[in-house]
Image: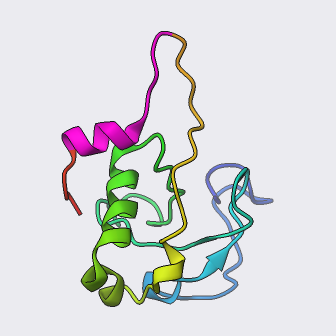
Amino acid sequence: MAWQGFTSNTGEYDKCVELEGWDLLGRKVKAPNAVKYDHVYVLPLLSIRMSKGTGVVTSVPSDAPMDYAALRDAQSDAQFRKKYYLEDHMVADFHPVPIIAIETKDFSSTQAAVDLVEKEQ
């Protein structure tokens, strides 16, 4: 954020807290621009490159196949949930909400994920 014009002086920031990604897993958060859910939970996405940015990303399972695969893995795999300290209610009732419209055809990453990314996490 310090390099994206969100701070008073580019490249400078005040540290508020220091934490590990593990500290965020399972936390209930308000997602900006979420249209269907009042809140979501912080889930792991194993394909993130920690050397590229903060490692914190917004997941869009309706339009990104890897995000859909991650949600599906969390929903269907009890061992995955246990490993990442997730409870069933944190993933069970969440379903992709499409946010991208393409005029020429219907697009759903859910089908793309099923076709291309089977169990990549």
Q: Main secondary structure of the magenta part?
A: helix
**Image: magenta residue range:** 104-116
Q: Is residue 25 in view?
A: no
Q: Position of residue 27 (x, y in %)?
A: 59, 82
Looking at the rendering, in which quadrant would you find the C terminus? Answer: bottom left
Asked whether residue 107 is drawn in magenta, I would say: yes
Q: Quadrant of residue 84?
A: bottom left
Classify residue 13 by image quadrant. Answer: bottom right
Which residue corresponds to the image point at 69% horizontal and 69% vertical from the top-left? Answer: 39
Residue at the extreme front of the image, as rendered? 93
User: Viewer-proximal residue, 23 or 28?
Assistant: 28
Q: Position of residue 7 (x, y in %)?
A: 75, 60
Residue in view at x 19 percent, y 58 percent: 119
Eyeballing the image, is 106 above or below 62?
A: above
Vertical arrangement, residue 92 with respect to residue 106, above or below: below
Count all numbered tags in the image, as a single digit. 0
83 left or right of 15 in image: left
Vertical position of residue 36 compared to residue 114: above or below? below
* Residue at the spot 44% in from the left edge and 85% down from the top edge: 86
Residue 121 lies in the magenta stretch:
no
Q: Is residue 102 left or right of residue 110?
A: right
Residue at the top extreme, as displayed: 104
Q: Quadrant of the N terminus?
A: bottom right
The spot of residue 99 in percent (x, y) is 60, 37
Residue at the image position 45 percent from the left and 15 percent from the top? 105
Residue 98 visible in the displayed image: yes
Residue 3 x %, y % = 61, 53
Q: Relative to 93, say whether 97 is above or below.
A: above
Name the side, left or right, on which 24 lies relative to 29.
left
Q: How is the image coloured?
A: rainbow
